[in-house]
Amino acid sequence: MKIRNRRQRMAVLMAVSLFLLVLVTAAGWAFGETASATDFSRKNLAPCLSYPFGTDFMGRDMLLRTVAGLSSSIRLGILTAAVSAVIAFILGLAAAVLGKAADGVISGMIDLVMGIPHILLLILISYACGKGFWGVVVGISLTHWTSLARLIRGEVLQLKESNYVKIAARLGHGKLKVAFFHMTPHLLPQLVTGLVLMFPHAILHEASITFLGFGLPPEEPAIGIILSESMKYLVMGKWWLALFPGLLLAGVVLLFHFLGEGLLLLLDPENAHR
């Protein structure tokens, strides 16, 4: 069947991206224990047919270790992006519905969080929560909601001026009922798109703080840990320890980007006939 327009092409690209992401996540989950298996008789092997990504200084298969690290990053990214999206939705809705006082407080919180260097705030929160898995989850969740919250606030301010919302208010519906039953259905496209577009940011920031030593523990097969360990061996010519994990990390980020762009195109009425 011939793909006729941009929306159909994007739908196909989204399907391929989603399939690859699910495949990586499932493969990493299945081979998690195998990826940590050590064998010093095969350490520091260059890429070959048996080990396409080579092996590291402990004889671990870098292909399996990289896939396991990406799987862990994807699962963590889904969790943190979902929490951030819920925070953004609630605060963005509250800022536009609960009056000027609430709007001032929440807008001040947004400006405060966005005014602090992102990676610095993420490191401070993660370190304060004891680092590790939950430190990363709390840190990313509390630093990625601001842009989406501001977007939702702006959308709600526009919806407040629409006729059906004014009619609902005149019929005696309370602010919260109007917000959740009349406004929320119109906010779902922005919420879903913002949720998907937060995934790559969450994954990259998890890899960044783990690379710096403030994220996941060293025994976890995380991409940040893999890249951090590889830095010690680059000067020894072990280029494959950093090249392949870095390329796959960039590939996963691009797949999430394609998903987000595709959702934005498919859910935007202005693009219905493109």
Image: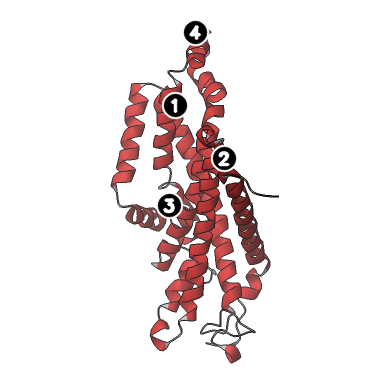
- Distance from disc 4 to disc 1, alpha carbons, whole Å, reads 18 Å
Query: Which of the two discs, 3 and 1, labels the residue nearer the N terminus?
Result: 3
Instruction: Say if mark 3 contacts mark 2, CB within 8 Å.
Output: no
Query: Which of the two discs, 2 and 4, labels the residue nearer the N terminus?
Result: 4
Q: Which residue is mark 3?
A: 139
Quadrant assignment for the C terminus: top right
Q: Residue at x 56, y 58 (%)?
A: 74
Kind of residue sitting beneath label 3: Gly
Kind of residue sitting beneath label 4: Arg
Q: Which residue is mark 2?
A: 266
Q: Residue 117 location in percent, x, y?
A: 30, 52
Q: Which residue is mark 1?
A: 156
Q: Residue at x 43, y 43 (%)?
A: 145
Instruction: Say if mark 4 contacts mark 1, CB within 8 Å.
Output: no
Secondary structure beneath disc 2?
helix
- Distance from disc 1 to disc 2, alpha carbons, whole Å, reads 21 Å
In the rendered image, the residue lying farthest to the top is 171
Q: Which mark, residue 170?
A: 4
Query: Which of the two discs, 4 and 1, labels the residue nearer the N terminus?
Result: 1
Q: Residue 94 location in percent, x, y?
A: 43, 28
- Distance from disc 3 to disc 1, alpha carbons, whole Å, reads 27 Å
